[in-house]
Image (cartoon, rainbow, N blue to C red):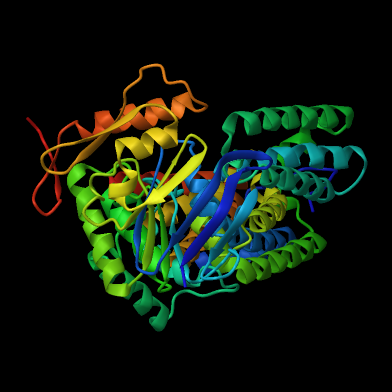
Amino acid sequence: MMSTATAITTMPNAALFTFNIFADLQGMWQYAFMRHAFEAGTVVAVVAGIIGYFIVVRQSSFAAHALSHIGFAGAAGAVLLGLNPIVGLLVFTGGGGIAIASLGRRAANRDVQIGTVLAFMLGLGVLFISLYSGYATEAYSLLFGEILGISAGDVWVTLIAGAVLLAAVAAVYRPLLFTSLDEDVAEAKGVPVFALGLVFMLLVAVATSIAVQVVGVLLIFALMVTPAAVAQRLVRRPAQGIALSVAIALAATWIGLFLSFYLSYPVSFFITTITFAVYVAVRFIQA
Amino acid sequence: MHVIEANNLEGGYASHAIWRGANFSVGQGEFVAVLGSNGSGKTTLFRMLLGLAQPLGGSISVFGAAPRRGNPRIGYVPQRHPIDAETGIEALQLVWLGAEGNRWGIGTGGRAATEEAMAALRTVGAEDLAHRRLGMLSGGELQRVFLAEALVGKPDLLLLDEPLANLDMRRESDLVRLINDVVRARKVTVLLIAHNINPLLPVLDRVIYVANGRVATGAPAEVLTSASLTALYGAPIEVLKDSRGRIAIVGIDDTPHHDHGEDHAEGGHGHAHTDHAGHHHDEHGHCYHDHA
């Protein structure tokens, strides 16, 4: 997972772009860190695209956003204790997810309460980071992502987490969609809406934890919400919406990594810019 | 056998009873209005029938057994739906979920499931809405889609929680006529929560009136009388009837002295205000708004 020593958010040396796309891809993939970035980025984009679709349909994007900030405190705490940040991320986002789900669906949309906790958690994260000597780089990589520092082991962790997430979503697909769209009817039909809410927030917690590597806690919206929001505007069937959401997240991640390799600006900047541009373009066309 | 049977039923939250002493039965194919002011416990009755809330006292049975969650013989349209202008999913998908949403695993609506959902939309005359986005539908269109979602499993009992709220008067009477046509054709029993009784009067078999912690039931002509409602509210109530049979329920005493004064004020004066605010019914009982 994220290196606790140095954060590499941009390329060490800008590579030369040749305008021969195959040669350029080959040139990029000869570096192990770029291969790892693509592998982990692909898993994260698929997971974010799928989970994000449900977040948007459930109108829970602020709760998901808050989870990533809660995760920041956990990650910073883990760094302080000399642990892998992913451990802190999973513990804090998992705990936060259970807490938000326990409030119930309608309560989970209480922006003021969630926002208050979010700010406190971000503050707590700042304290932990300041107590750790590597303050600036560590804070930067947690907040804005550090996909270029991913190791082969991190890729495996990401892949396994992603596979578990997809299996879980497949298992609860129909009832989750039902509760997301019409909770009261789903409950009357015997769907365990509270338990599903809990499961869903845990899925968001795991998805957030692995997505932080790519875009960081502050930019999680770009991968988890924006592609799904675009998809919901363009297609009317959930299966197609999920596919489109994944496609947008994948395209943004792949193009972002490619551009970052040759232009030497942060990957997360390109990813957020691409998803933002797609969102604005779709809104503009539909206006 | 009765579809619903309540004996000395008591409803409310935790240990706090909202109403008690309810005795009524509903037969197959009956169209029943559940009336009463906000907070009087009408939705609580629905939640009991759905197995989502337990009686605080007495007993209630649905199709001869204790209510249970997920009863496929019950179709339900709740008052609230988390659907807003941003909801981009098409209506057909929601109706499909009404049939298959309680099954685990992936399913994207095969041909049979899609045809079943389409048939439900056809039943309510909403076939043309199938591929429209839910967020783009009007209040009346949404109510038809919700009705299709409730009907898709071919239920024997429909529970409709304020389906007429937020509809203009023409759509209100159109929806009542549609519900009536569907339930008469299928011999489905309907309980419908409403605030305005007038659009329902032509089709009703029975009224369940919840007020003042008590429940009165019977034919509309029995329950909706000055004497009956005065006894129910425990305060003077007058039921006024105009030449076309429309009614208005008004409180006579401005400072009623009973346990639920607020209920009385809302229920009584609310009805009077609403029902004399320009409804006109033709000889078929259809309701039109008076723009004069």
Image quadrant in which you'd find residue A5: top right
The answer to whether residue B122 is above or below residue A188 is below
Locate residue B129, reporting x and y percent. Answer: 27, 62
Looking at the rendering, in which quadrant would you find the N terminus of chain A? bottom right
Q: Nearer the viewer, residue B23 or A257?
A: B23
Identify which residue is drawn at 57% across, 51% down.
Answer: B9
Looking at the rendering, in which quadrant would you find the C terminus of chain A? top left
Identify which residue is drawn at 39% across, 71% down.
Answer: B152
Number of numbered markers: 0
Instruction: Judge from the rendering whether residue B199 lies leftward or rightward of residue A107; answer left or right.
Output: left
Identify which residue is drawn at 59% across, 47% down.
Answer: B10
The answer to whether any part of residue A18 appears in the image is no
Instruction: Judge from the rendering whether residue B180 lies leftward or rightward of residue B268; answer left or right.
Output: left
Q: Seen from this angle, which residue lies furthest right? A: A81
Q: Which of B190 and B88 is in front in this view?
A: B190
Image quadrant in which you'd find residue B245: top left
Instruction: Judge from the rendering whether residue A56 lies leftward or rightward of residue B266; answer left or right.
Output: right
Identify which residue is drawn at 61% across, 47% down.
Answer: A267
The answer to whether any part of residue A112 appears in the image is yes
Q: Nearer the viewer, residue B10 or A132?
A: B10
Locate residue A188, reporting x and y percent. Answer: 54, 60
Q: Nearer the viewer, residue B174 or B211?
A: B211
Locate residue A124, reporting x and y percent. Answer: 79, 29
The answer to whether residue A85 is above or below residue A254 is above
Q: Seen from this angle, which residue lies furthest top? A: B255
Locate residue B98, reporting x and y percent. Answer: 45, 67
